[in-house]
Image (cartoon, rainbow, N blue to C red):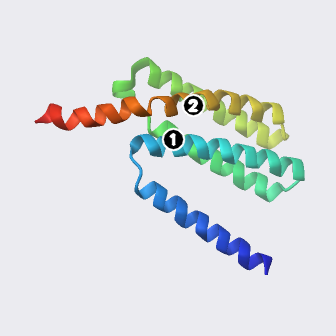
Amino acid sequence: MTYGYSRASALYQETNARGSVEGADRHQLTSMLFDGVIDRINQARGAIRRGDVPAKGTHFGKAHAIITELRGTLDHTQGGQLSARLDALYDYASRRLLHAQLNNDERAIDEVVDLLTPLRDAWRQIRDQFLASQKQAPSAAA
């Protein structure tokens, strides 16, 4: 019976997430990536503490995939030095996560969360600027 409930819950979460993604703009999608990577990292930490090796691998794998996606969103032609620095930070975070995964190193996990959390928070804070730029873009083209 618990399995059925867990499956239903997982399906609900998947459907809810898919609906959120389908209606999201670029800014919201990046925000979801930041939330997702921090969540997966914390889930990996929990798996380490429980000794759940398969879950640890799954969560670290998803965290790595999200960081790869964040790197893929960088525009190196227009982003200049900021884009290069973020790329280097994502590369470093990915290497630290690999270290954490291989060595069950929670200090490395803390380090990555401490690096990504301010980026996520700053990204949330620029939401109003993003929306204003989107409103100006169509009128500038007219």
Residue type, label 1: Ser
On the rendered image, what quadrant is the C terminus found in? top left
Do the numbered discs 2 and 1 sit on residues whose CB atoms are within 8 Å? Answer: no
In the rendered image of this protein, does residue 100 appear above or below residue 59?
Answer: above
In the rendered image of this protein, does residue 22 appear above or below residue 63?
Answer: below
Q: Kindly state the secondary structure of the residue where label 2 is placed.
A: helix
CA separation in Å, label 2 and label 1: 9 Å
Residue type, label 2: Asp
Residue lying at 62% horizontally and 31% vertically, measured from the top left:
116
Q: Residues within 10 Å of mark 2 (few under 14, many from 20)?
A: few
In the rendered image of this protein, does residue 45 appear above or below residue 93?
Answer: below
Q: How many marks?
A: 2
N-terminal of the pair, mark 2 or mark 1, is: 1
Q: Residue 103: x, y in percent? A: 84, 39
In the rendered image of this protein, does residue 74 appear above or below residue 29?
Answer: above
Q: Residues within 10 Å of mark 1 (few under 14, many from 20)?
A: some
Residue lying at 71% horizontally and 43% vertically, measured from the top left:
41
**Residue marked by disc 2:** 121
Residue 97 appears in the figure:
yes
Q: Kindly state the secondary structure of the residue where label 1 is placed.
A: helix
- Residue 31 is labelled as 1
Residue lying at 49% horizontally and 29% vertically, measured from the top left:
125
Residue lying at 59% horizontally and 26% vertically, measured from the top left:
89
> Which residue occupies the foreground of this view, 58 or 110?
110
Name the residue furthest bottom. Answer: 1
Q: Is residue 83 left or right of residue 94?
A: left
Residue 75 appears in the figure:
no
Q: Residue 94: x, y in percent? A: 65, 36
Q: Quadrant of residue 92?
A: top right
Q: Residue 135: x, y in percent? A: 26, 36
> Which residue occupies the foreground of this view, 127 or 91?
127
Q: Residue 1: x, y in percent? A: 79, 81
